[in-house]
Amino acid sequence: MKKIIIIDASPRKNGNSDVAAERMAAALQGNEVKIIKLREANIKPCIACDFCKKQDKAACVQRDDFAALIHDLDDCDAIALMTPIYFGQIPGPAKTFIDRCYAFFNPAKNYMSVATKRGKKAAVIGFCGSGPVEVYSKYLGDTAQNFGVLGVDATRVFMLGNVNEPGSCTKSDSCMNKIDETAKWLID
Ligand SMILES: Cc1cc2nc3c(=O)[nH]c(=O)nc-3n(C[C@H](O)[C@H](O)[C@H](O)COP(=O)(O)O)c2cc1C
Protein backbone atom coordinates (compact mmCIF):
# COMPACT_ATOMS: atom_id res chain seq x y z
CA MET A 1 0.00 0.00 0.00
CA LYS A 2 1.41 3.37 -1.07
CA LYS A 3 0.75 6.85 0.27
CA ILE A 4 -0.33 9.40 -2.32
CA ILE A 5 -1.17 13.06 -1.87
CA ILE A 6 -3.41 14.62 -4.50
CA ILE A 7 -3.35 18.42 -4.60
CA ASP A 8 -6.43 19.90 -6.25
CA ALA A 9 -5.53 23.46 -7.22
CA SER A 10 -8.76 24.61 -8.85
CA PRO A 11 -10.53 27.54 -7.21
CA ARG A 12 -13.82 26.35 -8.73
CA LYS A 13 -15.97 23.51 -7.42
CA ASN A 14 -16.79 20.57 -9.71
CA GLY A 15 -14.23 21.70 -12.27
CA ASN A 16 -11.91 19.50 -14.30
CA SER A 17 -9.31 19.37 -11.55
CA ASP A 18 -11.96 18.09 -9.10
CA VAL A 19 -13.02 15.40 -11.58
CA ALA A 20 -9.39 14.41 -12.17
CA ALA A 21 -8.66 14.27 -8.43
CA GLU A 22 -11.66 11.99 -7.81
CA ARG A 23 -10.85 9.84 -10.82
CA MET A 24 -7.26 9.40 -9.69
CA ALA A 25 -8.32 8.61 -6.11
CA ALA A 26 -10.66 5.91 -7.46
CA ALA A 27 -7.85 4.48 -9.59
CA LEU A 28 -5.66 4.38 -6.47
CA GLN A 29 -8.19 2.47 -4.37
CA GLY A 30 -6.50 0.23 -1.81
CA ASN A 31 -3.77 2.79 -1.21
CA GLU A 32 -3.63 5.59 1.34
CA VAL A 33 -4.85 8.61 -0.59
CA LYS A 34 -5.30 12.14 0.70
CA ILE A 35 -6.93 14.83 -1.47
CA ILE A 36 -6.06 18.40 -0.51
CA LYS A 37 -8.38 20.98 -2.08
CA LEU A 38 -6.35 24.18 -1.97
CA ARG A 39 -9.49 26.35 -2.13
CA GLU A 40 -10.55 24.90 1.23
CA ALA A 41 -7.10 25.00 2.82
CA ASN A 42 -5.58 27.76 4.86
CA ILE A 43 -2.11 28.02 3.32
CA LYS A 44 -0.35 31.33 3.69
CA PRO A 45 2.53 32.55 1.48
CA CYS A 46 6.11 31.71 2.45
CA ILE A 47 7.45 34.67 4.41
CA ALA A 48 11.13 33.81 3.71
CA CYS A 49 12.02 33.99 7.40
CA ASP A 50 14.49 31.08 6.94
CA PHE A 51 13.38 29.45 10.20
CA CYS A 52 13.33 26.22 8.17
CA LYS A 53 17.02 26.58 7.25
CA LYS A 54 17.96 26.29 10.93
CA GLN A 55 16.17 22.92 11.34
CA ASP A 56 17.40 19.42 10.59
CA LYS A 57 14.07 18.36 9.20
CA ALA A 58 11.31 19.96 7.19
CA ALA A 59 9.60 22.53 9.38
CA CYS A 60 7.82 25.84 9.14
CA VAL A 61 7.32 28.65 11.60
CA GLN A 62 3.80 29.27 10.30
CA ARG A 63 0.99 27.27 11.91
CA ASP A 64 -1.43 26.59 9.09
CA ASP A 65 -2.62 23.75 6.89
CA PHE A 66 0.70 23.51 5.05
CA ALA A 67 2.60 23.02 8.31
CA ALA A 68 0.14 20.27 9.21
CA LEU A 69 0.90 18.56 5.89
CA ILE A 70 4.70 18.56 6.17
CA HIS A 71 4.92 15.11 7.71
CA ASP A 72 2.68 13.58 5.03
CA LEU A 73 4.63 15.31 2.24
CA ASP A 74 7.84 13.85 3.63
CA ASP A 75 6.40 10.40 4.20
CA CYS A 76 4.35 9.92 1.01
CA ASP A 77 5.39 7.90 -2.03
CA ALA A 78 3.85 10.14 -4.66
CA ILE A 79 2.26 13.51 -5.29
CA ALA A 80 -0.25 14.47 -7.97
CA LEU A 81 -1.14 18.07 -8.77
CA MET A 82 -4.42 18.69 -10.61
CA THR A 83 -4.49 22.24 -11.87
CA PRO A 84 -6.14 24.71 -14.21
CA ILE A 85 -4.04 27.09 -16.28
CA TYR A 86 -4.62 30.73 -15.37
CA PHE A 87 -2.96 33.28 -17.66
CA GLY A 88 -0.48 30.68 -18.84
CA GLN A 89 0.49 29.60 -15.35
CA ILE A 90 -0.73 27.65 -12.33
CA PRO A 91 -3.26 29.59 -10.19
CA GLY A 92 -2.03 31.55 -7.17
CA PRO A 93 -2.89 28.95 -4.50
CA ALA A 94 -0.86 26.31 -6.37
CA LYS A 95 2.15 28.65 -6.56
CA THR A 96 1.77 29.44 -2.86
CA PHE A 97 1.73 25.71 -2.08
CA ILE A 98 4.93 25.17 -4.08
CA ASP A 99 6.60 28.19 -2.44
CA ARG A 100 5.89 26.68 0.97
CA CYS A 101 7.83 23.55 -0.10
CA TYR A 102 10.81 25.82 0.68
CA ALA A 103 10.43 24.22 4.14
CA PHE A 104 12.21 21.19 2.60
CA PHE A 105 14.94 23.15 0.80
CA ASN A 106 18.40 23.28 2.28
CA PRO A 107 21.41 23.85 0.01
CA ALA A 108 23.76 22.43 2.65
CA LYS A 109 22.15 18.96 2.45
CA ASN A 110 22.34 16.13 -0.08
CA TYR A 111 20.06 16.90 -3.03
CA MET A 112 19.62 20.35 -1.41
CA SER A 113 16.73 18.91 0.61
CA VAL A 114 15.92 17.67 4.09
CA ALA A 115 13.29 15.24 2.74
CA THR A 116 13.86 11.92 4.52
CA LYS A 117 12.25 9.76 1.83
CA ARG A 118 13.59 9.98 -1.72
CA GLY A 119 12.55 8.17 -4.90
CA LYS A 120 9.08 9.72 -4.89
CA LYS A 121 7.09 10.31 -8.06
CA ALA A 122 5.08 13.38 -9.06
CA ALA A 123 2.43 13.87 -11.71
CA VAL A 124 0.95 17.14 -12.85
CA ILE A 125 -2.34 17.09 -14.76
CA GLY A 126 -3.42 20.40 -16.25
CA PHE A 127 -6.60 21.78 -17.84
CA CYS A 128 -7.06 24.85 -19.99
CA GLY A 129 -9.32 26.66 -22.43
CA SER A 130 -8.15 27.42 -25.93
CA GLY A 131 -4.53 28.26 -25.08
CA PRO A 132 -1.45 26.50 -26.50
CA VAL A 133 -1.40 23.01 -24.94
CA GLU A 134 2.24 22.25 -25.89
CA VAL A 135 3.47 25.48 -24.32
CA TYR A 136 1.52 24.80 -21.11
CA SER A 137 2.66 21.20 -21.08
CA LYS A 138 6.31 22.24 -21.12
CA TYR A 139 5.63 24.83 -18.42
CA LEU A 140 3.94 22.19 -16.24
CA GLY A 141 6.96 19.93 -16.80
CA ASP A 142 9.17 22.67 -15.37
CA THR A 143 6.69 23.20 -12.53
CA ALA A 144 6.82 19.49 -11.66
CA GLN A 145 10.61 19.73 -11.27
CA ASN A 146 10.04 21.86 -8.17
CA PHE A 147 8.75 18.76 -6.37
CA GLY A 148 12.35 17.52 -6.42
CA VAL A 149 12.71 19.33 -3.10
CA LEU A 150 10.19 16.87 -1.59
CA GLY A 151 12.33 13.90 -2.68
CA VAL A 152 10.71 13.44 -6.10
CA ASP A 153 12.99 12.11 -8.82
CA ALA A 154 10.52 11.09 -11.54
CA THR A 155 7.80 13.28 -13.01
CA ARG A 156 5.01 13.02 -15.59
CA VAL A 157 2.75 15.65 -17.06
CA PHE A 158 -0.55 15.50 -18.92
CA MET A 159 -2.25 18.60 -20.26
CA LEU A 160 -5.78 18.72 -21.72
CA GLY A 161 -7.06 21.69 -23.72
CA ASN A 162 -10.49 22.98 -24.75
CA VAL A 163 -12.15 22.13 -21.44
CA ASN A 164 -13.55 25.46 -20.28
CA GLU A 165 -16.80 23.92 -19.06
CA PRO A 166 -16.56 22.56 -15.50
CA GLY A 167 -16.04 18.79 -15.62
CA SER A 168 -15.98 18.66 -19.43
CA CYS A 169 -12.81 16.54 -19.31
CA THR A 170 -15.09 13.53 -18.67
CA LYS A 171 -16.00 13.71 -22.38
CA SER A 172 -12.42 12.81 -23.26
CA ASP A 173 -11.88 9.06 -22.93
CA SER A 174 -8.19 9.53 -23.62
CA CYS A 175 -7.96 11.96 -20.68
CA MET A 176 -9.75 9.55 -18.34
CA ASN A 177 -7.46 6.73 -19.50
CA LYS A 178 -4.42 8.95 -19.05
CA ILE A 179 -5.44 9.68 -15.44
CA ASP A 180 -5.85 5.94 -14.72
CA GLU A 181 -2.51 5.21 -16.41
CA THR A 182 -0.79 7.99 -14.44
CA ALA A 183 -2.27 6.62 -11.20
CA LYS A 184 -0.80 3.18 -11.98
CA TRP A 185 2.58 4.72 -12.76
CA LEU A 186 2.56 6.67 -9.47
CA ILE A 187 2.31 3.46 -7.43
CA ASP A 188 4.46 1.28 -9.69
C1 LIG B 1 -8.60 33.55 -14.25
C2 LIG B 1 -8.59 32.57 -15.38
C3 LIG B 1 -7.51 32.57 -16.27
C4 LIG B 1 -7.44 31.64 -17.30
N1 LIG B 1 -6.37 31.67 -18.13
C5 LIG B 1 -6.29 30.75 -19.14
C6 LIG B 1 -5.18 30.75 -20.02
O1 LIG B 1 -4.24 31.53 -19.89
N2 LIG B 1 -5.17 29.85 -21.02
C7 LIG B 1 -6.19 28.95 -21.22
O2 LIG B 1 -6.13 28.17 -22.17
N3 LIG B 1 -7.24 28.91 -20.38
C8 LIG B 1 -7.33 29.77 -19.34
N4 LIG B 1 -8.39 29.74 -18.47
C9 LIG B 1 -9.39 28.65 -18.60
C10 LIG B 1 -9.14 27.50 -17.60
O3 LIG B 1 -7.80 27.07 -17.62
C11 LIG B 1 -10.05 26.30 -17.91
O4 LIG B 1 -11.41 26.70 -17.78
C12 LIG B 1 -9.78 25.09 -17.03
O5 LIG B 1 -10.48 23.98 -17.54
C13 LIG B 1 -10.19 25.33 -15.58
O6 LIG B 1 -9.87 24.19 -14.81
P1 LIG B 1 -10.86 23.66 -13.67
O7 LIG B 1 -12.11 23.19 -14.38
O8 LIG B 1 -10.14 22.55 -13.01
O9 LIG B 1 -11.14 24.80 -12.76
C14 LIG B 1 -8.49 30.68 -17.46
C15 LIG B 1 -9.58 30.69 -16.56
C16 LIG B 1 -9.64 31.63 -15.54
C17 LIG B 1 -10.82 31.62 -14.60
Image (cartoon, rainbow, N blue to C red):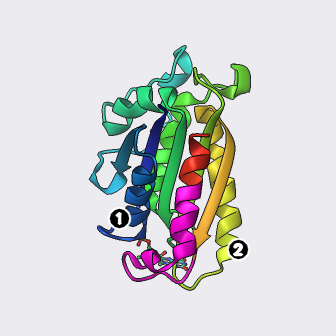
Element class at badge 1: loop
Residue 41, x across and y down, in percent: 30, 47
Rendered residue at 42%/79% (across/down): 168
On screen, residue 15 above or below 182: below
Question: Is residue 87 visible in this depiction of the protein?
Answer: no
Q: Quadrant of residue 61?
A: top left
Q: Which residues are magenta?
A: 161-181
Query: Real-space Cα distance between discs 2 and 1?
Result: 23 Å
Is 151 situated left or right of 32 in this image? right
Q: Are marks 2 and 1 in contact (CB under 8 Å)?
A: no
- The x, y position of residue 58, in whole percent, is 50, 23
From the top left corner, tell me how far across and down residue 131 is, in percent.
Answer: 60, 82
Disc marking residue 11: 1
Q: Nearer the viewer, mark 2 or mark 1?
A: 2
Q: In the drawing, does residue 170 fall left or right of residue 11?
A: right
Assess disc 1: are there few (<14), some (14-19) or many (≥20) residues with their C-alpha within 10 Å of its C-alpha. Answer: some
Which callout, 2 or 1, points at the residue further toward the start of the chain? 1
Percent x, y of residue 127:
51, 71
Q: Is residue 68 visible in this depiction of the protein?
A: yes
Query: Majority secondary structure of the magenta segment?
Result: helix
Quarter assignment of residue 17: bottom left
Q: Nearer the viewer, residue 173 or 115?
A: 173
Residue at the image point whose x is 58% and y is 20% from the top: 116
Residue 131 lies in the magenta-colored region = no
Q: Residue at 36% of width from left, 47% of height from top?
A: 36
Q: Residue at x 63, y 50 (%)?
A: 144
| Figure check: 104 above or below 166 | above
Badge 2 crowding class, 10 Å Cα cut-off, few under 14, some 14 to 19, many 20 or more, is few
Circle 2 SS class: helix
Q: Amino acid at mark 1?
A: Pro
Relative height, residue 17 to residue 165 (above, below): above
Please name the residue that numbered disc 2 is placed on: 134
